[in-house]
Amino acid sequence: MELLCAERVSPGSGESARPGPAPTSLAAASDPVLLRRRVLDNLLRTEERYAVTANYFGTVQTEITPHMRRLVAEWMLEVCEDQSCQEEVFPLAMSYLDRFLSTCTVGKSQLQLLGTACLLLASKLREPSSHGLPAELLVFYTANSITLTDLCSWELLVLSKLKWDVAGVTAHDFLPLLLSRLPLRGLVNISMVQRHAQTFIALAARDYEFTLYPASTLASCSIAAALRGLGLDGHLSRLHDLTGIDLDCLQTCLEQIEEMVQTLIEERVISVPNGQGREEAGWTPPPTQDKAHSNAATPTDVRDVHF
């Protein structure tokens, strides 16, 4: 018997360091089996296990505030964007962070370290094996305010507090299942709707007020907001039928997402006039790893928090 491997390995596929954005990975072809109704039903049943159902500020957390959480979340999002991470990495990292904060008290000096550990774990789970965020690079992004030993220790601490249950359900998991069941074919580019919905999910993950919504609610309303933004019907009734979520709850969440997007647009117009890019507006991308660590590009507003 002859065994033949037809796999082709591209040059550089074994490189572990990634000083700049990672090259685009080839994704597996979509499997129609994963779009069956039973998969959606399983996600709807499972999402409750990963939901944060109570406000942990003022109860579990006595030092940190929603504003501090937002600053760290925005820093985490910039890291993911700069490293071209998969869309699922940031919301999953924020899910870890919120689940941890709902059970374990954290000091102000530990919040960014917690966020970094959550990014490391989410990257390991959702990124291709060759493109996960290296721990050394994450330390570099914090302007060396943490050590590699601290990060490894907190990675284990987060895993223990989450009981090693890290394959959490996020709003991203619902997008293909819901979009495939809406009457959109021939009316709009479904890939565009999905990209817009992914953006809304990432933006919502920065704000604590969206944490109390189940993943299915956030996914449904992000799709509806994306459709309405393109001048189409949001299909809230159909989304209600698919998920069983109360229509009033869907409408409330949709209005909050649209208000969030409108506020963000207005802030961008004021702070970045004439269509300037992030670099022109004062955002400096991180240098390659061979440069001095003193030049690390931790966002200024995160540094202003007294960790």
Image: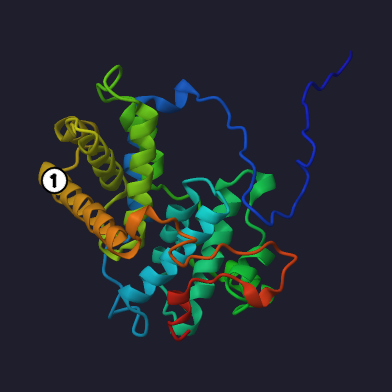
Q: Residue furthest top?
A: 1
- In terms of depth relative to the viewer, which is nearer, 221 or 225? 225
Residue 91 makes an appearance in the image: yes
Residue 107 makes an appearance in the image: no
Q: Picture coordinates of residue 219 (x, y %)?
A: 31, 43
| Amino acid type at mark 1 | Gln
- In terms of depth relative to the viewer, which is nearer, 281 or 130? 281
Height in image: 222 above or below 81? above
Q: Picture coordinates of residue 143 (x, y %)?
A: 60, 75
In the image, taking residue 288 as reference, residue 72 lies left or right, namely left
Q: Residues within 10 Å of mark 1 (few under 14, many from 20)?
A: some
Rendering quarter of residue 20: bottom right
Q: Residue furthest left?
A: 248
Rendering quarter of residue 2: top right
Q: Residue furthest right?
A: 1
Height in image: 175 above or below 81? above
Q: Residue at x 55, y 47 (%)?
A: 126
Q: How many tags in the picture?
A: 1
Q: Picture coordinates of residue 305 (x, y %)?
A: 43, 82
The structure's colour scheme is rainbow
- In terms of depth relative to the viewer, which is nearer, 295 or 84? 295
Q: Secondary structure at mark 1?
A: helix
In the image, taking residue 270 as reference, residue 119 lies left or right, namely right
Quadrant of the snapshot with the N terminus: top right
In the image, taking residue 158 as reference, residue 214 lies left or right, namely left
Q: Picture coordinates of residue 222 (x, y %)?
A: 28, 43
Q: Residue furthest front?
A: 274
- In terms of depth relative to the viewer, which is nearer, 145 or 114? 145
Q: Residue at x 25, y 63 (%)?
A: 209
Residue position for label 1? 251
In the image, taking residue 65 as reference, residue 16 lies left or right, namely right
Q: Residue at x 39, y 30 (%)?
A: 191
